Every structure is written in C-alpha cells, then in structure tokens.
Image: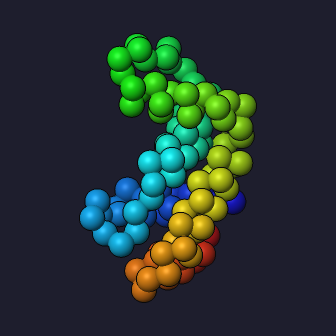
Amino acid sequence: MSKAKFDKAVAIVQSLPKEGPIQPTQDEQLYFYKYFKQATVGDVNTSRPGMLDFVGKAKWDAWKSVEGTSKEDAYEKYVEKLLEILKRADTEESKKYIAEIEAAA
C-alpha cells in the first residue's frame, strides 16, 4: 500500500463532516487512530494516561495493541478499513472518495 493512498485516506477521514452520511463508529474511529499513530509515529512512546482519562486510555490501549506493526502494514489496514466503510455507505460521495483513493499513486 502506498503512502499516497494512506495520505489520501487520512485526508478523507479528517474531512468527514460530523453530521454527514458517512459516519465511522467509535470502534472504527479507534481503529483509524491506532493505525494512524502506528504509521506516523511507530510503537507507543508515551506512558499510559491516568485512570480518569478514559478517552486517552482507550486511544493509548488501541495504539499499544498494534505495537510491532510495520508502517506499510499500518498504511494498508487504515486504507482497507476506510474502503470498507465507504463501500458500506454506498453514496455518491463515498464512490467519489473510493475513486480518489484508488487513483492515488
């Protein structure tokens, strides 16, 4: 999976409107988060947040769960998940996004 496809997928995920027709679930958002962090930072390099930081802990735990995954595998997992969500949405907008990802070099 190319970095260009990953970069395009990241741009699409970050541009999705909060109230739009394409809405990743919380689990899917965590999936994107963990593979984005693994692809861009590598293995977890921070300590686990405190017990009252529920969101921070969930994100840290998700990222930690993919420790050791290569950058290229993280690119692939991220892009494949987005394509799965876009195909499920089956809207004109999602079809446009799929074409943009596939066209990325």
Q: Which residue shows up at 39% across the image and 31% down it? A: 55
Residue 42 located left or right of residue 54:
right
Q: Quadrant of residue 38?
A: top right
Q: Give the percent coordinates (x, y) of residue 91.
A: 44, 83
Q: Quadrant of the C terminus?
A: bottom right
Residue at the image position 50 percent from the left and 62 percent from the top: 9
Looking at the picture, the colour scheme in use is rainbow
Q: Position of residue 10 (x, y in %)?
A: 47, 56
* Residue 4 occupies quadrant: bottom right
Residue 70 is left or right of residue 4, and the answer is: right
Nearer the observer, 33 or 89: 89
When the figure is inspected, residue 83 is found, relative to residue 42, above or below; the finding is: below
* 84 relative to 100, above or below: above
Most foreground residue, 21 or 12: 21
Quadrant of the rendering where the N terminus is positioned? bottom right
Question: Which is more toward the observer, 98 or 48?
Answer: 48
**x and y percentages locating residue 80 in the rendered image:** 64, 62
Residue found 37% across the figure and 56% down from its top? 14
Q: Is residue 92 left or right of residue 82?
A: left
Can residue 4 be seen by looking at this rendering? no
Residue 79 % position (x, y): 59, 60
Which residue corresponds to the image point at 53% horizontal and 66% vertical from the top-left? 85
How many labels sit on residues? Answer: 0
